[in-house]
């Protein structure tokens, strides 16, 4: 999967899923530091949609997201 495909998946699914889960417009999306996730165009997509992104190191052995909030 490349950055363009990743953005297409986000466009098709993320906001609708957030709506279905009743998260509202103010939620934090978590992703790792894979290059397609950190691509300038992808980060720009999040910015235009006003979505806060919680960075997560690739291959992180620490899977406790609460600790990183």
Image: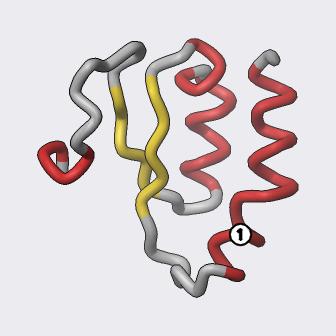
View extreme (left): residue: 67
Give percent across and percent down for residue 39: 61, 20
| Residue occupying image coordinates x 71% and y 69% | 17
- Judging depth in this view, the residue of 66 and 24 nearest the camera is 66
Q: Position of residue 51 (x, y in %)?
A: 52, 58
Which residue shows up at 81% across the image and 52% down it? 11
Locate residue 45: give its quadrant. Answer: top right
Q: Is residue 24 above or below residue 8?
A: below
Q: Is residue 37 left or right of residue 62?
A: right
Residue assigned mark 1:
17
Q: Percent position (x, y) of residue 55?
A: 36, 34
Tag 1 secondary structure: helix
Is residue 10 or residue 46 the one in the foreground? Answer: 10
Question: Would residue 35 appear left or right of 28 to someone viewing this image?
Answer: right
Q: Position of residue 59 (x, y in %)?
A: 39, 14
Tell me the quarter of the picture where residue 60 sits: top left
Residue 69, placed above or below residue 3: below
Vertical placement of 27 versus 6: above or below? below
Q: Residue at x 87, y 55 (%)?
A: 12
**19 vs 3, nearest the viewer:** 19
Left or right for 20, reference 24: right
Mark 1 Cα within 10 Å, few/some/many (few <14, many 20+)?
Answer: few
User: Observer-nearest residue: 34 or 42?
Assistant: 34
Q: Is residue 65 above or below residue 63?
A: below
Left/right placement of residue 48 relative to residue 65 reads: right
Instruction: Report the coloring of the rendering.
Output: secondary structure
């Amino acid at each position: 999967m490349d950055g363009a495909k990743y953005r297409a998946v986000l466009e098709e699914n993320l906001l609708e899923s957030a709506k279905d889960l009743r998260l509202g417009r103010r939620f934090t999306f978590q992703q790792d530091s894979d290059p397609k996730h950190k691509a300038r165009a992808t980060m720009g997509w999040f910015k235009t949609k006003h979505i806060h992104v919680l960075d997560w190191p690739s291959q992180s052995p620490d899977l406790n997201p609460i600790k990183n909030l």
